[in-house]
Image: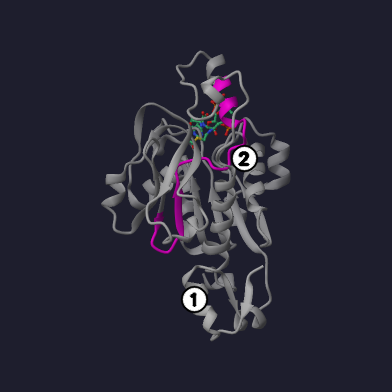
């Protein structure tokens, strides 16, 4: 739990500069703690797998988090049982009257079509517009990040000559500056699985955006606006140990041209069990987002967003 100390204790200043989370007594004692409200917009065909992966990471926190699940009304998912959607998910028409501390927009296997051809594009644009006034911080993943950067900032995506596939080393652009990467090692690993990319030069043209982390091999990794209310991540830190394997096996069985995922199988041998290099960074990324970008910044009264 965060430490609660008097506002003017000398240690407060020092610790604050080190990004140690302090709960000042006026906040700690004058307000009740309430659970954080997080909305998961799940665009993946593998909805149950994805929601489990993300909840595992969101659950690695002493903060209490209440999660609502949303899917798109303008595309009926084929791969998720209707029963599951009816029981656990809502659509935007019931969600839009609420406010949230955080939202996650997942990836989706639609990256090779123009944004406007995605069946739920207009609905997604409406959701992203709504999020500006109804969500404190939104974390966008993979295609969700491409969609968010295109919708909010006009940043295009580009096709890659071959799939970016594997687990790649990354580095932080300004160590000690961004709380999203507090506690990270100098080099950390992230899975990527995509046929498209966003480019550094397009992001650098936009003064509202900053690149926080990147990979020599996999390119831009994290982009954020100046207040961390929009965070865009090109990798899949949430992936399970065998997710890349299942995608690789699927593509091999369909005789698609696909390389062995990089830095994944020992000795690059797909008959061996993969080695997980990204789990600790994944846990830290999500707990830092929840703590520093959601909990510490969101208004206690969500109607004041
Ligand atoms: C770039 C990123 O964000 S990577 C994240 C995406 N990664 C993954 O989805 C990995 C797991 N997915 C898979 O393995 C495959 O998509 C499978 C096996 C589930 C299904 O593959 P296929 O049967 O070949 O494709 P299919 O035609 O059913 O479409 C798959 C999904 O693409 C999406 N999709 C396809 N066409 C459209 C379209 N025009 N508009 C919107 N969504 C579309 C849908 O989400 C669809 O799944 P759903 O109907 O359950 O929502
Ligand atoms: N991660 C995706 C890429 C396609 O968008 C897959 O392999 O299914």
**Picture coordinates of residue 177, whole percent (x, y):** 41, 61
Q: Residue 228 in magenta?
A: yes
Mark 1 to mark 2 CA distance (whole Å): 40 Å
Q: Is residue 207 left or right of residue 277?
A: left
Q: Residue at x 51, y 13 (%)?
A: 255
Q: Is residue 11 visible?
A: yes
Residue at disc 2, secondary structure: helix
Quadrant (top left, top right, bottom left, bottom right) of the N terminus: bottom right
**Picture coordinates of residue 232, whole percent (x, y):** 44, 49
Above or below residue 302? Residue 183 is above
Disc 1 crowd, CA 10 A, few/some/many (<14, 14-19, 20+) = few
Read off the magenta span. Answer: 224-250
Between tags 1 and 2, which lies in front?
Answer: 1
Disc 2 crowd, CA 10 A, few/some/many (<14, 14-19, 20+) = some
**Picture coordinates of residue 199, whole percent (x, y):** 32, 41
Question: Toward the viewer: 156 or 205?
Answer: 205
Q: Residue at x 65, y 37 (%)?
A: 49
**Picture coordinates of residue 71, whole percent (x, y):** 59, 44
Above or below residue 240? Residue 252 is above
Q: Residue at x 48, y 41 (%)?
A: 235
Q: Is residue 90 visible?
A: no
Q: Which residue is mark 2?
A: 50
Q: Earlier in the sequence, mark 1 or mark 2?
A: 1
Q: Residue 217 in magenta?
A: no
Above or below residue 122? Residue 93 is below
Q: Which residue is mark 1?
A: 14
């Amino acid at each position: 739990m965060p430490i609660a100390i008097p506002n003017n204790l000398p240690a407060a200043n020092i610790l604050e500069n080190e990004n140690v989370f302090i709960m000042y007594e006026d906040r700690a004692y004058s307000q009740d703690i309430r659970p954080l409200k997080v909305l998961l917009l799940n665009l993946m065909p593998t909805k149950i797998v994805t929601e489990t992966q993300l909840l595992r990471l969101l659950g690695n926190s002493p903060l209490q988090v209440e999660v609502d699940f949303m899917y798109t009304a303008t595309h009926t998912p084929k791969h998720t049982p209707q029963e599951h959607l009816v029981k656990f998910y809502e659509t935007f028409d019931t969600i839009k009257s609420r406010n949230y501390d955080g939202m996650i927009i997942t990836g989706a296997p639609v990256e090779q079509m123009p944004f406007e051809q995605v069946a739920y594009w207009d609905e997604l644009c409406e959701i992203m517009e709504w999020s500006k006034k109804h969500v404190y911080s939104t974390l966008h993943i993979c295609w969700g990040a491409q969609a968010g950067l295109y919708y909010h900032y006009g940043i295009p995506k580009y096709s890659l000559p071959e799939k970016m596939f594997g687990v790649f080393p990354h580095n932080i652009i300004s160590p000690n500056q961004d709380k999203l990467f507090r506690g990270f090692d100098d080099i950390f690993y992230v899975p990527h699985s995509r046929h498209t990319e966003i480019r550094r030069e397009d992001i650098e043209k936009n003064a509202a955006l900053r690149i926080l982390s990147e990979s020599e091999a996999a390119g831009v990794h994290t982009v954020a606006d100046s207040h961390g209310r929009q965070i865009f991540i090109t990798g899949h830190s949430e992936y399970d140990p065998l997710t890349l394997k299942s995608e690789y096996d699927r593509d091999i069985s369909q005789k698609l041209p696909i390389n062995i995922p990089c830095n994944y199988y020992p000795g690059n041998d797909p008959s061996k069990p993969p080695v997980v290099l990204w789990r600790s960074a994944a846990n830290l990324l999500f707990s830092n987002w929840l703590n520093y970008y959601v909990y510490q910044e969101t208004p206690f009264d969500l109607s004041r967003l």
